[in-house]
Image (tube, rainbow, N blue to C red):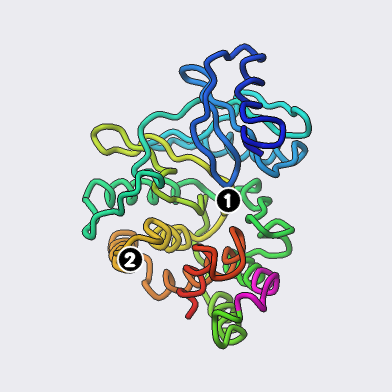
Amino acid sequence: MTETDAHGPDRWVQYFAQRGYPHARRLASGMEGTVYRLRDGTVAKVWAGRAPEDFDLTRRLYADIARHPLPFGTPRILDAEEYDGVLVSYERELGGSPLRSDGDGRPPARDLPRRETDALLTVLRALASVPAGEVMRRLVIQGDDRPLWQGHSRFSDALAALVERAAGRNRDALAAQVPGLADVVSRTTASLRALPDRPESLVHGDLVPPNVHLDEAGHPVAVLDFGFCTTAGDPAFEAAVTAAVWDMYGPDAAHHTAELTRLFARELGHAEEVLDLYRKAYALITYDLFGMGPHDGHFRWCAALLR
């Protein structure tokens, strides 16, 4: 629900003004909801589809992350309330500027600047330093109906089970674009289950450019929007997804994915074949989250990767 819903174009701006924030303005919208700046240092998030009774896990996740020293800020909940059945949280505003805005219309340069790749390595190393915790294992990946880790003791087994569930959600739509889909799913899940035990840590799962904020010197100062694919998992999964989603639709997207895959393999010690495997798994668990069929960009991207 956003400020342009059926209640009127300025519903939330008006609501926050009544709550004592006369200068509230909308900042951005994403999968989780819409963010408003209330005043210096404070923002509010109007959550989309998040039941108030489920929010305690998010609050506990943020607190768990904050207990570990990181070289950048992460979200912290100051207060939360329910208004007309919608969850509203009040959070500290994180600093810096998005590394790249999805709305600026400019594709990234073919050769990614050192500023970007260094920032990504810093973020990936830092997130991998946060130990996997019980709260992370209780989170549900977007689009699923149960915690990822439910009934499993290994990340790769849990991910394989999710791949099977997700591929079955809208199998016919995906099979129309991916010949031999059943074999793709079977090979992917078998390969996941065959992976050896690997260290588990915090996985953000959606390190797209707008979610990484830098200062003027190019250092990461904030990482935003945990929740879409956040869990406890293999740091290689985080690296694989980041290499894939950093530039999904630009003219040099394939080049950037290959460039980042090589970089992460070399600098972080991940095997390229494992990164490729996790990328296929990511496509299979997210292909239908934004739309079904070739009219949707994310669906087309996932189908092309699986082909």
Note whether 92 is above or below 297 in the view shown: above
Q: Earlier in the sequence, mark 1 or mark 2?
A: 1
Instruction: Tell me the distance, in whole angstroms, between the alpha carbons under discs 1 and 2.
Output: 24 Å
Residue 85 location (% of width, % of height): 78, 34
> For residue 168: magenta?
yes
- Label drawn at residue 265: 2
Mark 1 — residue?
228
Q: Quadrant of residue 185?
A: bottom right
Q: What kind of residue is marked 1?
A: Phe
Image: magenta residue range = 164-174
Q: Quadrant of residue 73?
A: top left
Between 79 and 25, the one lying in front of the other is 25
> For residue 272: magenta?
no
Instruction: Say whether marks 1 and 2 touch (CB < 8 Å).
Output: no
Residue shown at the point (68%, 65%) measured from the top left: 152
Residue shown at the point (52%, 50%) measured from the top left: 202
